[in-house]
Amino acid sequence: MGEQEKMEKSDMPLTALREGETGIVTSIKSGPGRGYGRGIGFERRLMDMGLTPGTEVVVIKSALFHGPIEISVRGSRLALGRGIAERIFVVKKSA
Amino acid sequence: MPKRKITIALAGNANVGKSVIFNHLTGLHQHIGNWPGKTVERAEGTLHFRGHTIDIVDLPGIYSLSTYSLEEMISRKYIVVERPDLVINVVDASVLERNLFFTLQLIELRTPMVIALNQIDVAKKKGIKIDVEKLEKLLGVPVVPTVAIKGIGIFQLLEKAIEIIEKGQETKRIEVRYEEEVEERIAKLAKMIEGIQFWYPPRYAAIKLLEGDEEIERIIHRINPQITYTAKKLANELENIYGHSCATIITSERYGIAGCIAREVQKLVPPIKPTKEERFHTLTTHKILGYPIMVFLLLLVFHSIFTFGNYASELLRNFFYNWEFLFTDFFGIGVIGKLVWGGIIEGIISGITIAIPYIVPFYFILYFLEDSGYLSRIAFLMDNAMHKIGLHGKAFIPLLLGYGCNVPACLGCRIMETERERLLAAFVTTLVPCAARTVIILGLVGQFMGIQWALMLYVFNLVVIFILGRLAFKMLPGEPTALIMEMSDYRLPHLKTVVKQTWSRLVEFIKIAFPLIIVGSFVIKLTEVLGLLEPIATSFSFITVMWLGLPAATGIALIFGILRKELTLIMLAVLLGTTNFAQVLTPIQMIVFTLVIMFYIPCIATIAALVKEFGWKKALLMTVFEIAFAIILGGVALRVLTLIV
C-alpha cells in the first residue's frame, strides 16, 4: 500500500459503513450459536465471491428497515442480506 | 484418424451467457434433464462440425469449485471423473477479475480448455478494454472473444476447440503459484499423494486438502489416513503463520493472482455518465421507488397473462369441442363414450387449454425477466420481508410463480441454496392461491359477495402464509439463511434462449401434470358413471355438514378438487343444480368453502411435483398437514363468523 491512506484503527461490521463509503475487509466471522457448521459455508461462499481479507468494498445502497445491502467488490455488484453483512468486518478507508 | 465422439463441457460463473453459447452450439438438438439423483439441471446437446459428432454439456453456473454447493460438487466431479475432451470456460469480460478466479481453478485442475471471453461489448460500454493476446499469453490458454447474444465469435470458438482436441493442447500454461510458505507445504503433500491412485492431479488435491475440502479429504482418508493427518498439521502451521484459516489464505492468494492478471490486461476508462443500464438499476432498486415499480410491473405481467390466457383458452376450447360430434358419432353416448370422452379426452383437452394459454406466457415472461436481470432485483427488494419467514429474497420468485400455478413454483424452489430452504419455500408456495383457486375466489366470493370480500381473503391468505411460514421456520432445525447474490448488469435477453427455456419447462410440466390430470378426470367420470358420487358425499358429511356447515354435495367438489381444482366451481354448480350460488349458499358458507379450497393441498399435480423434489414422506406430510389445517380453519371460521354476524 504505497498511498498514504488514513485508516481508522478499529474494524467494524460492513453494515456500519454509510452509502458510498469504502471499507477494507479484515475478517469474516462465522456465525455463533445456531450457525455452527454451516456458518463456515457462508464464509467460503463470500470469499469465493471475492470478499477476501484486504479487499476493497464499496457500499452502494442499503435498503430500508434493515434490509439487504448492495456492495461493489472486484468490479461486480453483490446483494448481501443484512445478517450476513453484519459478519463481514472492515476498516473504513477515508478518502 | 478415425473420428470419435467428442465431449465438450461449458463451465463458468452464473449470468455470463453460458446458456446462450450452449444454444448457439446445439441449436435444436438438446435435451434437458437432471443430474442422476440430483435436482440440478443438466443440459446436453449434440452438434456436428467438420465430421465430428460433438456432445456439449452445459454445467451449472458456479463461482468456485470449492464444493460449497451441490452445483459445484457436480461440476467438479464431472470434469475430473468423466473427463470431457475439452472445457470451454465462459468468462464475462465485464467482471474479469472474479471470472478469472474460477478460470484459475480450472487451470489447476489441468483440464484441456479454451476461454470464451464473452460480453466484450458490455465491457466496452463500461469502459473496459481487454488485451486478448496478453491474457492468452499470461494464462497460457487460448482466448476467443465473443458476443454470444449476437452470435459473434461462436464459430471461431468452435474452431479453436476442435483444433485443441485434434492437436492436443500446448502445455505452457501458467502454474498458479502461492507464497513460499504455502508452496513448501503443497509440495510436501503432493509428493505423498503422488504415491496413491487418485483421480485429481496431486498438486490440486494437495491444495484442496489444505483448504479443508471435505470431499477430497474423505476419499483420501480412506486410501491413506496418514496424508490427511499431515494435511491437517500443515494447515495448522499455515494458520499460525498467517493468522487466517487456510482456506482464506489460499482463496486470497488465488484472488490476488486473478486480480494481477486482470489489472495487467484491462484498460479502464470509466464512462463519464452512468450507462443506461446503470441508471435503470439505480431506479429499480431504489429504496422507495423500487417498490411501486415492482408492484406495477408484476401487476402488468399478471394482467397480460390472464388476458391472453382467457382469450387463448376460449379459442382452444371452442376448437376442440367443435369436434365432439365426430367423437360421439363414433363411440356413441353410452357408458364407454362417456368414459372415453368425459374421462380421457376432456382431461387432455383441459390440460391443453389450461397449460398452453397460461403456463407458456407465464414461463416466457419469467425467463425474460430472469435473463434481463430483473428477478435478482426483485429478490433484493423482497429480501427483508422474506427473512421474516426464515427465507431470503430469492424465495419470493417461486412464491410469485405460485400465483400462476403451484407446480412450476414447487420446481422453482430449486433456486434456493440448501435443502431446508427449498422445503420451506415449497411449503409456503403451496399455500399461495394459484390461478385455479383464484377462479373460485373471484367466481364465488367475488361474484356473489363483492370484490372487497375476495380481496380480504387474499390479505388473510398472506397473513396465514406469514404465520405458518414462521412456525415452519422455527420448527425446522438448521442453519440460518442469507442472501448472497450477484446482481449482474441489465441486458436485453436472448430471445431464442428464453424460448428454449420456456419450451423445456413446458415439457417438464406436461410430463408431471398431464398424466395426473387425465387420470383425475377419468376417476371423476368413472365415479359419476358408477353412481358413487352420492355415497361418497354422505360418507364425508360429518366433515362437510357437521363441522363446516356446508351442503353435503360440496364434499364431492372438495374431494375432486384435489384432482382437478379448476373444475371445482363447475362441479359445484352441477351438484347444487344452479350457477346462482347465492340461492343455495349463505355468505358464510361461501367464505368457509373458499377458505377450505384456498388452503387444502393445491392439486394432485402439485403433490407429484413435491414428491419429485422432496420424496414421498415430506410430500405426504405437507399434504396431510394442509388438508387438516384447511378443515380446522374452515370450521373455526364458521363459528367465529356466525358469532360476529
Image (cartoon, coloured by chain):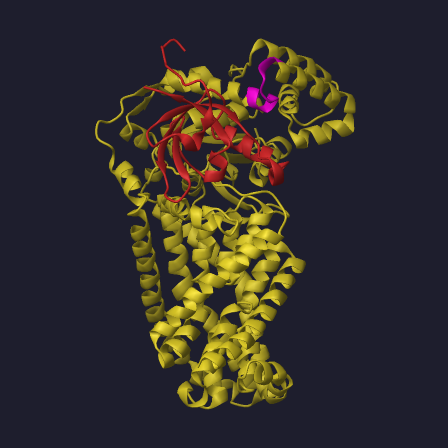
Chain colours: A red, B yellow
Q: Please say if B231 is above or below B418.
A: above
Q: Residue at x 39, y 32 (%)?
A: A71
Query: Does residue B299 appear anywhere in the picture?
Result: yes
Answer whether residue B243 is magenta in the image: yes
Task: Where is residue A76? Give x, y as percent.
Answer: 39, 31
Magenta part, dominant SS: helix
Q: Residue at x 55, y 63 (%)?
A: B606
Task: Where is residue B62? Give x, y as percent.
Answer: 51, 36
Answer whether residue B227 is magenta in the image: no
Q: Residue furthest left?
A: B273
Is B152 positioned to the left or the right of B403 in the image?
A: left
Q: Please say if B11 is above or below B425.
A: above
Q: Give B304 or B6, whichever is nearer the viewer.
A: B304
Q: Please say if B85 is above or below B518.
A: above
Q: Residue at x 38, y 48 (%)?
A: B378
Task: Where is residue B641? Give x, y as percent.
Answer: 47, 78
- Part of the protein shown in magenta: B241-250
Q: Give B35 or B621, whichever is nearer the viewer.
A: B621
Q: Quadrant of residue B446?
A: bottom left
Quadrant containing the N terminus of chain B is top right
Q: Quadrant of residue B610?
A: bottom right
- How many marks are shown on the rendered structure? 0
Quadrant containing the C terminus of chain B is bottom left
Query: Does residue B525 appear anywhere in the picture?
Result: no
Task: Where is residue B75? Give x, y as percent.
Answer: 57, 36
Q: Give B81 or B446, whichever is nearer the viewer.
A: B446
Q: Residue at x 56, y 19 (%)?
A: B249
Q: Please say if B61 is above or below B530.
A: above
